[in-house]
Image (spheres, grey):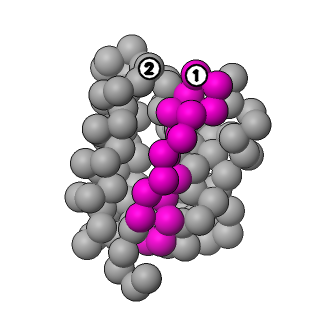
Amino acid sequence: MANSVEFEAKNVGDWNVVSFIGRVDTITAPQAEERSMEELGKTNKLALNLSQLSYISSAGLRVLLRLAKQSKKDGKEFAVCSVTGIVREVLEESGMDSLITLYDDESELK
């Protein structure tokens, strides 16, 4: 699973939740962004579940920023949930946690 990312999509209430599985880095960020933007286009509420994400690079952080900007521009809600370990540390250290809505888990999506 080195240098790969997989996706699983489901609905939680009126949220479209996409789980990222693997890594989001320079190699996989374009794929992650394309899939996420596609999902954002289908819903008014998009959440990314990062519980199975083992690594995120600055390219991955850019994906999150672009999603946040696009959702704001489109008047939609965007959130990230179930962030753990090193990925949570990266989001907090980069200040990303102050720019996007973070939920501890999917049960908080309302």
Query: At 30% across and 67% down in the image, what residue appears?
Result: 28
* Residue 103, quarter of picture: top right
Q: Which residue type does callout 1 highlight? A: Asp
Say which element carries label 2: loop
- In the depicted view, which residue is nearer to us: 15 or 26? 15
Between marks 1 and 2, how big is the CA–CA gap? 8 Å
Circle 2 crowding by C-alpha within 10 Å: few under 14, some 14–19, many from 20: some
Query: At 33% across and 56% down in the image, what residue appears?
Result: 32
- Compared to residue 101, the image places residue 25 above or below, namely below
**Magenta portion: prevailing SS class:** strand
Mark earlier in primary sequence (1, 2):
1
> How many labels were placed on the picture?
2
Q: Give the residue pinned by disc 2.
A: 44
> Which quadrant would the N terminus be assigned to in this image?
bottom left
Query: At 64% across and 25% down in the image, what residue appears?
Result: 13
Disc 1 + disc 2, Cβ < 8 Å: yes
Say which element carries label 1: loop
Q: Position of residue 64 (x, y in %)?
A: 40, 47
Is residue 85 visible in the rendered image? The answer is yes
Q: Give the number of the mark in front: 1 or 2.
A: 1
Q: Residue furthest top?
A: 75
Q: Is residue 2 left or right of residue 81?
A: left
- In the depicted view, which residue is nearer to us: 7 or 90? 7
Query: At 55% across and 73% down in the image, what residue appears?
Result: 54
The magenta stretch is 6-23
Is residue 57 visible in the rendered image? The answer is no
Circle 1 crowding by C-alpha within 10 Å: few under 14, some 14–19, many from 20: few
